[in-house]
Image (spheres, rainbow, N blue to C red):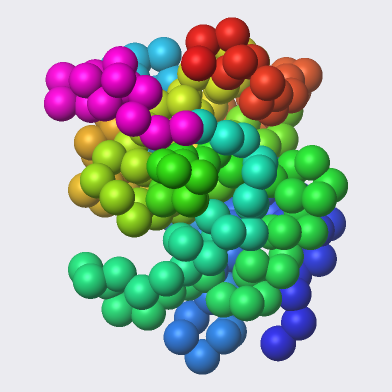
């Protein structure tokens, strides 16, 4: 199977759809109803995470190893069968990253990548794709700093696609697809840029 073109990816996100690969490599496009989003303004780190953040247990980097994060996200998980992140998906999003639309927030310990997340940024929207954690709290810390980046760059919509236990812990809610599409179109009109360098002021 061939990789999805970057134009097709961008057009998909702009119209509220996103791709996922099945076990046989076939790629399908999805537009969930309802749609899961995380309100950027109301997120607060859990009490258990605050000591980890205060001790700066992990080093945070942005866009240092985008493909490494994707491969971490594509690794088998004990609670899930298979993965929707195929080689074609990795190739497509890495190309999108090289164009400046896809980004990763990464956690390191002793210079080793131990967790992170990635997603797509278009104007005032960040489309969260996946996260992984090889150490306890590594992905939670990455998400915390993603929120700081989005706040400091004045993003207004954080899409997380489907509701599940993982995104619920970050305050995810479900909204009707039509409401999501309305919020999406409004957010796409805002001139925003994903600038990870803003973290240098708070790290």
Image coordinates for residue 134, horizontal then vertical, percent: 34, 56
Image quadrant in which you'd find residue 168: top left
Direction front: furthest residue = 110
Q: Is residue 35 visible?
A: no
Left or right of 98 in this view: 20: left
| Residue under the point 48% across and 50% down | 112
| 42 w.r.t. 167: above or below | above
Nearest the eye: 125 or 174: 125
Q: How many marks?
A: 0
Direction top: furthest residue = 201
Q: Is residue 187 magenta?
A: no
Which segment is the magenta one?
47-59
Q: Is residue 48 magenta?
A: yes
| 123 w.r.t. 65: above or below | above
Left or right of 173 in this view: 151: right
Left or right of 99 in this view: 112: left
Image coordinates for residue 135, horizontal then vertical, percent: 29, 50
| 106 w.r.t. 162: above or below | above
Image quadrant in which you'd find residue 48: top left
| Residue under the point 64% across and 67% down | 90
Looking at the rendering, in which quadrant would you find the N terminus? bottom right
Nearest the eye: 120 or 111: 111
Image coordinates for residue 62, horizontal then vertical, percent: 61, 35
| 119 w.r.t. 87: above or below | above
| Residue under the point 55% across and 47% down | 118
| Residue under the point 46% across and 86% down | 23
Nearest the eye: 117 or 101: 117
Image coordinates for residue 95, horizontal then vertical, percent: 79, 59
Q: Is residue 64 visible?
A: yes
Nearest the eye: 17 or 149: 149
């Amino acid at each position: 199977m061939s990789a999805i073109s970057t134009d097709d990816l961008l057009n998909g996100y702009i119209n509220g759809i996103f791709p996922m690969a099945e076990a046989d490599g076939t790629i399908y496009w999805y537009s969930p109803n309802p749609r899961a989003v995380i309100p950027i303004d109301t997120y607060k780190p859990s009490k258990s995470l605050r000591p980890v953040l205060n001790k700066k247990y992990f080093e945070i980097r942005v866009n240092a190893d985008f493909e490494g994060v994707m491969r971490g996200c594509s690794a088998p998980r004990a609670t899930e069968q298979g993965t929707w992140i195929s080689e074609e998906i990795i190739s497509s999003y890495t190309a999108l990253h090289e164009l400046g639309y896809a980004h990763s927030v990464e956690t390191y310990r002793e210079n080793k990548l131990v967790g992170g997340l990635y997603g797509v940024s278009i104007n005032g929207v960040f489309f969260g794709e996946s996260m992984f954690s090889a150490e306890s709290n590594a992905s939670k810390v990455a998400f915390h700093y993603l929120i700081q980046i989005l706040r400091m760059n004045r993003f207004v919509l954080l899409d997380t696609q489907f509701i599940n236990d993982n995104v619920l812990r970050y305050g995810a809610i479900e909204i009707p697809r039509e409401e999501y599409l309305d919020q999406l179109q409004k957010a796409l009109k805002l001139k925003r840029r994903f600038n990870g360098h803003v973290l240098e002021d708070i790290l």
